[in-house]
Image: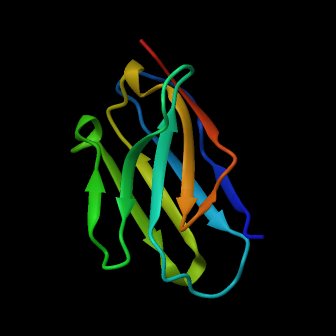
Amino acid sequence: QVQLVESGGGLVQAGGSLRLSCAASETGIWVAPVAWYRQTPGKERELVASIAVNTTVDYAVSVRGRFTISRDGMKNTWWLQMNRLKPEDTATYYCKLAKYWGQGTQVTVSS
């Protein structure tokens, strides 16, 4: 069973930045898509950003120009750099590798 360990969430003021990290427990090189999702209470989990196997990057419209997803395939680690954060970015953020999910990390943006 692959475990994904997330870190980097927290409380930040609007306009600030946070960087989320996700690392896979298994060694070896994963040829698989990676992604970040987020979820708020009562709403469905939504895709925030992703990197496909062919390295195509995609972002939700609401975060384009503010968030950047990146990965280090050799270290099975990927990141989500979040800049110019807004209160509406407040959510629990989850990383995903293939079919595996992280445990979630809370991001709270105060106005």
Frontmost residue, 43 versus 54: 43
Q: Relative to 17, say whether 23 is above or below.
A: below
Q: Relative to 5, say whether 18 is above or below.
A: above
Q: Relative to 30, say whether 13 is above or below.
A: above
Quarter of the image that includes the C terminus: top left
Position of residue 94 measured from the top left corner of the image (x, y, whole percent): 57, 46
Residue at 49% from the left image edge and 83% from the top image edge:
31
Position of residue 60 measured from the top left corner of the image (x, y, whole percent): 29, 43
* Coloration of the structure image: rainbow
Frontmost residue, 85 versus 27: 27
Position of residue 67 measured from the top left corner of the image (x, y, whole percent): 33, 46
Q: Quick check: 111 left or right of 67?
A: right
Frontmost residue, 110 versus 38: 38
Position of residue 19 measured from the top left corner of the image (x, y, whole percent): 49, 47
Residue at 55% from the left image edge and 53% from the top image edge:
95
Q: Quick check: 71 left or right of 62?
A: right
Q: On the image, which quarter does residue 33 sit in? A: bottom left
Residue sitting farthest toward the top: 111
Residue at 37% from the left image edge and 66% from the top image edge:
51
Residue sitting farthest toward the bottom: 28
How many numbered discs sit on the rendered protein?
0
Quarter of the image that includes the N terminus: bottom right
